[in-house]
Amino acid sequence: MKSLLLAALFASAVAYAQTDPAGEWAPQFHEDQPERIPGPEIGDYLGLPINNAARLRGDAWDASLLTVPEHQCKPHPSDYSPRGPANLRISKLIDRDTQQVVAYQTHISWEAPERTIWMDGRPHPPAWAPHTWQGFSTGKWEGNMLTITTTHLKIGWIRRNGIPRSDRATVVEHWIRHENYLTWVVIITDPVYLTEPFIRTTDFKADPDQQIAPYPCEIVVEIQRPKGAIPHHLPGTNPFLTEFADRHGVPREAARGGAETMYPEYRQKLAGKAVSIPLPPPQPAPAAPAPDAAVHSIQVQGNVSMLVGAGGNITVQHGANGVLMVDTGLAPMADKVFAAVNDIAPAQPLRYIIDTHVHADHVGGNEALGKKGSTIAGGNVVGDIGGSAAQGATIIAHEEVMNRMSAAPPAGQPATPFDALPTDTYGGTEKDLFFNGEGIELLHQPAAHTDGDTIVFFRRSDVVSAGDIFTPERYPIIDLTRGGNVQGVIDGLNLIIDLTIPAEKQEGGTMVVPGHGRLCDEADVVEYRDMLTIVRDRFQDMIKKGMTLEQVKAAKPTEDYDPLYGDNTRFVEAVYKSLKP
């Protein structure tokens, strides 16, 4: 009886065994070596369920982009890193007391990306958390297969010839071990650039004698270019797009990719036969989270935090001298903002408010929050003005913001309340503060989002508060009526890139609080700067050809970016009018 019980237990254990993937693994290249080692050819979109936006981004891509300093040391994201000379190490993080696997960790030889796959059931971060090259991954066992779900990825590749995978994608992976072989299945669901999930497999073989060398990366100037120049092909000018199809005898239409070309029936269609290709419905865009009318905080680094949910993002710095805020959000959210600030810095006085620009979603809370603060005042100021000199926080802005806020309002609109106006302005290009043991630079960027934009740099905490010069989840709003200009926005983005220094792998280091959207770093600003520079170059080319605004709109010059950044109506008009002589 005892032997039968032991046999039953053993059989049960075998049925639910989890084959440990830890160890050293060498990549196998028998399936698709030409794509993975030499690299895919320009214009090779075969087998990719891409939409036209992704196709156009591939058409515009120039490999010389990778010589730009900000792009040189970027690793492949976790969904693409197994594709190259990817010698792989998988290790385990084990809880000492319970001996349970807390996480699997991976290290890949090419560019040395490192990744953690959490196995302890922790949730994925909120939407406003930073995105990284490796993303945030959680794993669970499904029988003998480890299934991994990854979110919070930076923009990466579907194929590294310019076909993008957006930062809104979700990646599901399966690790399947068969004795000394590991199959790595990657399934990418991207509502921005794919019309259906894209599946890719990569194989590895156990290599216990493997030694992975370090992979240091140093940025150098490879090609001398004007500052801010971004290599790319203008629409219709890439001379290399048909070379792949012609060299390999592939129909040019098929080489353009798309879900339809993945099905066997497509051969009959190319032969001129009437066929019905059973395509799945397009992937729906994820529904935007419903506003919860709450203000959320996330600690950035140092003594700086970010508040989201109040309209525009708010930056909070706190310390022994009190609290400094960059922007105040919408007026109706002021009480919730104050409560969130008090959670970060309990009972500390609000001393300073810095306005990045004039719009109500950033200065609407000035009046209510300013009254809750107190200025450090004394000497002749109190002697001349009285004790009221210390009442209220000091509100600092560029003088153009003061001019706009104090001007007579348009007909039918109320005037800005007196207590919402800046109490301290600066002219010229910059103003310096030293508060809570930290140097703070206020840098004016003229004629950008507006004519009064201020970028705030917290030097010790290594955080930049960008205002609406940088809004990574939508096109910039270029407020022409308040002095905005597309070239000023590009200049502002390049200034932010000058201020930021990324940590290893072009990630982290200086963090950037955007005017709206998730917490970012330099790589996110670079992606946005590249987009805006490419779009500007297209508009300049069309204006040079004498095209009218309506002709430019009909040409769809932002079609490859619209699924990522949304409605382009105001943006296209503003860019055209900014550049039109």
Image (cartoon, rainbow, N blue to C red):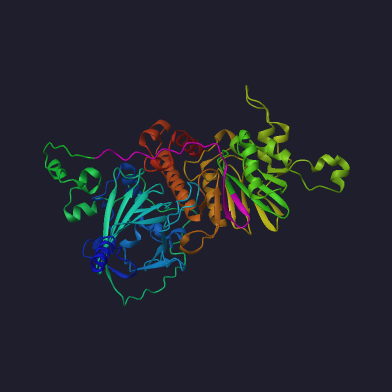
Quick check: 567 left or right of 311? left
Q: Is residue 556 left or right of residue 525?
A: left
Task: Name the outermost residue toward the right.
Answer: 383
- Whole-percent x, y for residue 22 in the image: 34, 68
Q: Position of residue 364 (x, y in %)?
A: 63, 35
How many numbered discs sit on the rendered protein? Answer: 0
Residue located 44% across and 70% down the image: 216
Up-down relation of residue 334 to residue 261 (above or below): above
Helix, strand or loop: magenta stretch: loop
Q: Position of residue 493 (x, y in %)?
A: 53, 49
Residue 559 quadrant: top left
Quadrant, the N terminus:
bottom left
Q: Is residue 38 visible?
A: no
- Give the magenta range: 280-305
Q: Residue furthest front?
A: 1
Instruction: Let me know if residue 336 is in the magenta part.
Output: no
- Nearer to us in this view, 57 or 381: 381
Considering depth in this image, is 84 or 426 the residue closer to the camera?
Answer: 84
In the rendered structure, the answer to whether residue 237 lies left or right of residue 381 reads left
Magenta stretch contains residue 284: yes
